[in-house]
Amino acid sequence: MGRLFGTDGARGVANSELTCELAMAIGRAAAMVLINSENGKKPTVFIGKDTRLSSDMLEGALTAGLCSVGANVVLLGTIPTPAVAYLVRKHSADAGIMISASHNPFEFNGIKIFNADGYKLSDSLEEEIESIVLDHSEEYPAPTGDGIGKVTTLKTGIDEYTDHVANSISGDLSGLKIALDCSNGSASATAEILFKKLNAEVVILNNDPDGVNINDNCGSTHIEILQDYVKDHDVDCGMAFDGDADRCLAIDENGELIDGDFLIAICAKNLKEKGKLKGNTAVGTVMTNMGFTKFCDENDINFVATAVGDRYVLENMLKNGYCIGGEQSGHVIFLEHGTTGDGQLTAVQVLDIINSKKQSLSQLASVIKRFPQVLINVKVSSEKKSLYASDDVIMDSISNAEKTMGKRGRILVRSSGTEPLIRVMLEGEDIEEITQIANEISQLIKERLG
């Protein structure tokens, strides 16, 4: 993990950790690293944002930084992260930036950078940016006169993006009634437009952003609101997005959670049946439920696990030519249609399967039996969250627990790539056993590092 960038961009409390000065510096450095100005043309960078109060402030700082080194800026306004990736590629821009802290509370914000092909930056490019910003390894250029960049606005971005997602299926979603939780975030600008284009009957929840209510007891990180709605109303299912709409979690017609592992399984099985599952492989992470591995075995599908983070899933997919992968959290990548996780695209793909197969979401999800899983987030400082791996007492405790569980389960302890947390995850056959072990390890980490 880098000094500025975690698994999903640079992130921190806005105006405290992620300041305007830092945002301006990141904009300047990103332009220097990503853009080839040898052709004599001014480079173009697209900027999108979510609905946080601080997003306008950081947009201004990034814009100033980019223009000050001679880059032109195109503002996309409030829009999902995957829309930025798509529009950069479609309009042949040099780079794209999304201002968002995804699923985090409103006081946080973040900066995600995409290259000209719409992919998140590699570790090596992020390290170059970090070196310029933190070590002052290169001087910022300072053009004057007409060398300064200009700012314009792309007013068609939402229509272009929603058309792209709608066209990812051959038909429409007529006959389906769906509840959509927009998390008071980026999906508030696009979801109703998209699903009405597909002729679905939609009920929109949490689509009234005010700058501070993004992810506030709603969306994919607070799924209970959507669960209660689906249970109490006559809808086929519910779909919940996070703050920047690159994640999707679903609720079946009975009010049960259908997480990313299930959504990937449903889509991978459908692709295999159509002869479109490239490499006969689905890609997940080390956090993928053991039930998914069993599903793959039963359906003659290969499973590849990467490090946590959709960027690592994507790297593996690109390297090996696979077409579907993602995370339990709801980041799902359909490489035929996009270059990053896309919550609304995921929802459309799953709903299309429901419509074409004339099966309920619970019937489709029955292909997996979920192994009990316990996840405890231990709050520590950002400076200490990586120290557990060098603490002999903590590592001995983890090792002893692994021996106790044997083949009946597994343990994964890791630092969060986006928050000051150490995540302790246990999975196994006996929920009481894994809960006890998870609590013991979490308490030990808290005592030694908290």
Image (cartoon, grey):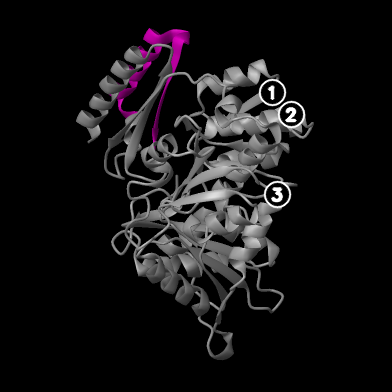
55 displayed left or right of 155: left
| Residue at figure coordinates x 48%, y 74% from the top left | 63
Q: Position of residue 12 (x, y in %)?
A: 35, 55
Label 1 CA crowd tier, 10 Å (few <14, some 14–19, many 20+) = many
* Gap in angstroms between the C-alphas marked 2 and 1: 8 Å
Q: Which residue is mark 3?
A: 168
Q: Which residue is mark 1?
A: 301
Q: Is residue 144 above or below residue 200?
A: below
Q: Position of residue 182 (x, y in %)?
A: 45, 52
> Mark 2: which secondary structure?
helix
Q: Which residue is mark 2?
A: 272
Type of residue at label 2? Lys
* Gap in angstroms between the C-alphas marked 2 and 3: 17 Å
* Gap in angstroms between the C-alphas marked 3 and 1: 23 Å
Residue numbers of the magenta segment: 390-415
Q: Position of residue 207 (x, y in %)?
A: 43, 57
Where is the C terminus found, in terms of image quarters?
A: top left
Q: Is residue 409 above or below residue 186?
A: above
Magenta-span inclusion, residue 397: yes
Q: Main secondary structure of the magenta part?
A: helix
Q: Are marks 2 and 1 in contact (CB under 8 Å)?
A: yes
Type of residue at label 1? Ile
| Residue at figure coordinates x 32%, y 21% from the top left | 438
| Residue at figure coordinates x 60%, y 55% from the top left | 196
Nearer to us of marks 2 and 3 is: 3
